[in-house]
Image: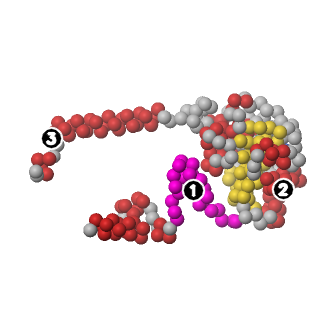
Amino acid sequence: MSAQNSAPGPLKQSVRRVKKSVAKGWKSLKERISIPYLNRMTSQERVGIVYRVPSEMSIEERLFLFAFIRGTRPQRVLEIGSRHGGSAAIISCAMEDNGRGQVIGIDPGPDITVKKSLFHGRFHLISRPSPEAIPEAYQVANGFFDLVFIDGLHTHRQCAADLAGSLPYLADGGYVLFHDAFHLGVSESIRQALESDPRLHDCGYMCVRPYTDEPLLSYRGLRMLRFASSAVANPEPLIEAGYREVGLNPPVPHPDLLDHDGWYCRHFEPCPHCRAEKAALVSSKR
Ligand SMILES: C[S@@+](CC[C@H](N)C(=O)[O-])C[C@H]1O[C@@H](n2cnc3c(N)ncnc32)[C@H](O)[C@@H]1O
């Protein structure tokens, strides 16, 4: 049978076109319907929480905090300074989106005004001061913290005590995030800790817009430290955990894959791995 004879007729072609366009329309409709409603706190994406809660954090700081929790998927967070529960609600909502995690807040004088439902059962408050209450928070969390968020009393003395008191309860590879890191006392305590503890690594300022209405010293600024025995982060345990979580075996690292990129190898130049794979396929067919 010639190629011309097997070509579909005009009717078949139009039916195919219609089917294709219906499928495309249905796909785009499904995509539109499934876009989460960010302000509904029962939705699958609750990022709208950043506009709803009382907090002295700027919008970009709130967005960063939310995204950081979504991205790093912590199991346990310690919050030093909870006041009205604003940042705790942001963390809790991001954890709810992740489907895991709990945040333990410590504050000697909390005044929680955020609706309880916005914590999604993930926030536990201890009404005692840091650093004394940190061991109790660790007991409640039942494990090392993946993140300590320090936003308590903004003095050099207290911030240094918050940080020193938290480190024994921080997981290897965990983070410390400071709010109001532009405060003179806060930034000085961070500088001193970095100088004296080689396990602390400076990740710099995540949010850089200072609060400028205070003439004496500045506030705001989110600063991050990483607490780890090695300064270089190892991606392998994270990749492994991600694959295992969805029931798959993680890929095995191989030097031939260093220059592999699926798209580039397909369209431009195959890498050593792709070349070897193709050669093996050809010889198996012989
Ligand atoms: C800036 S507010 C926290 C705001 C909260 N992180 C937010 O953004 O929604 C500071 C809080 O730190 C609390 N605080 C003061 N001294 C503290 C301490 N030693 N330990 C823990 N919290 C402390 C205060 O009671 C106050 O509620």
Look at the image and name its color scheme: secondary structure
Question: Quick check: 53 left or right of 241?
Answer: right
* Label 1 beta carbon less than 8 Å to ligand 1: no
Q: Residues within 10 Å of mark 3 (few under 14, many from 20)?
A: few
- What x and y, as percent, mark residue 193? 81, 61
State the SS at label 2: helix
- What x and y, as percent, mark residue 200? 75, 62
- What x and y, as percent, mark residue 257? 47, 66
* Label 2 beta carbon less than 8 Å to ligand 1: no
Taking the magenta stretch, the answer to whether it contains residue 117 is no
**Whether residue 115 is visible:** yes
Q: Which residues are magenta?
A: 230-253
Of tags 1 and 3, the one toward the viewer is 1
State the SS at label 3: loop
State the SS at label 1: helix
Q: Residues within 10 Å of mark 2 (few under 14, many from 20)?
A: some
Q: Are marks 2 and 3 in contact (CB under 8 Å)?
A: no
Q: Amino acid at mark 3?
A: Gly
Mark closest to the chain's N terminus, 1 or 3: 3
Relative to 241, is 108 above or below?
A: above
Quickly name the residue at label 3. 9
Q: Residue at x 43, y 34 (%)?
A: 30
Disc 2 to disc 3, C-alpha distance:
77 Å
Question: Quick check: 216 left or right of 123?
Answer: right
Which disc number belongs to residue 164? 2
Q: Amino acid at mark 2?
A: Ala
